[in-house]
Image (cartoon, rainbow, N blue to C red):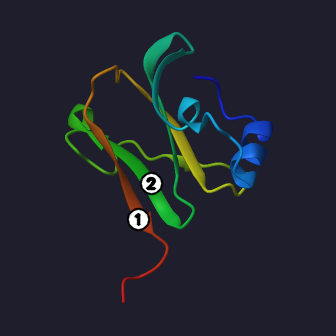
């Protein structure tokens, strides 16, 4: 998976990033010689997003994602040591309180 470029974000915002699945989700890759998985999710109303899974005992504080600086609502991060077949979910904390 290639990183999201400014052009990708532009197309995503206008609704024409037709292959968004190549950028968002979970994609195994190597960064700085370390194998792992890159995660990216669109969560525009999130206050915090993290990846939880069997690899971190479903702990929501272990692998937080970071929001992109471009205000796209996309959160992303890289988790070393996580490979294909790993069980995971996104833990998303909303900016809004439930009524």
Vertical arrangement, residue 82 with respect to residue 9, above or below: above
Q: Which residue is mark 2?
A: 49
Say few, some or many: other residues with alpha carbon within 10 Å of mark 2 (under 14 / 14 to 19 / 20 or more): many
Q: Residue at x 58, y 33 (%)?
A: 23
Callout 1–callout 2 Cβ contact below 8 Å? yes
Q: Residue at x 44, y 14 (%)?
A: 35
Task: Report, in whole angstroms, how far the alpha carbon at label 1 lies from the one at label 2.
Answer: 6 Å
Q: Position of residue 61 (x, y in %)?
A: 34, 50
Which mark is drawn over residue 38?
A: none
Answer with left or right where residue 10 lies relative to residue 77. Answer: right
Q: Residue at x 59, y 50 (%)?
A: 74
* Quadrant of image for the C terminus: bottom left
Say few, some or many: other residues with alpha carbon within 10 Å of mark 1 (under 14 / 14 to 19 / 20 or more): some
Q: Which residue is mark 1?
A: 93
Q: Position of residue 27 (x, y in %)?
A: 47, 26
* Quadrant of image for the N terminus: top right
């Amino acid at each position: 998976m290639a990183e999201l470029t400014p052009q990708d974000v532009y197309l995503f915002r206008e609704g024409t990033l037709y292959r968004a699945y190549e950028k968002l989700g979970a994609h195994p890759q190597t960064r700085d010689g370390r194998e792992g998985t890159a995660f990216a999710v669109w969560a525009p109303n999130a206050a915090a997003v993290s990846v939880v899974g069997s690899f971190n005992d479903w702990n929501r504080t272990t692998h937080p994602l970071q929001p992109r600086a471009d205000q796209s609502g996309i959160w992303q991060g890289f988790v070393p040591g996580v490979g294909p077949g790993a069980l995971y979910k996104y833990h998303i904390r909303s900016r809004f309180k439930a009524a």
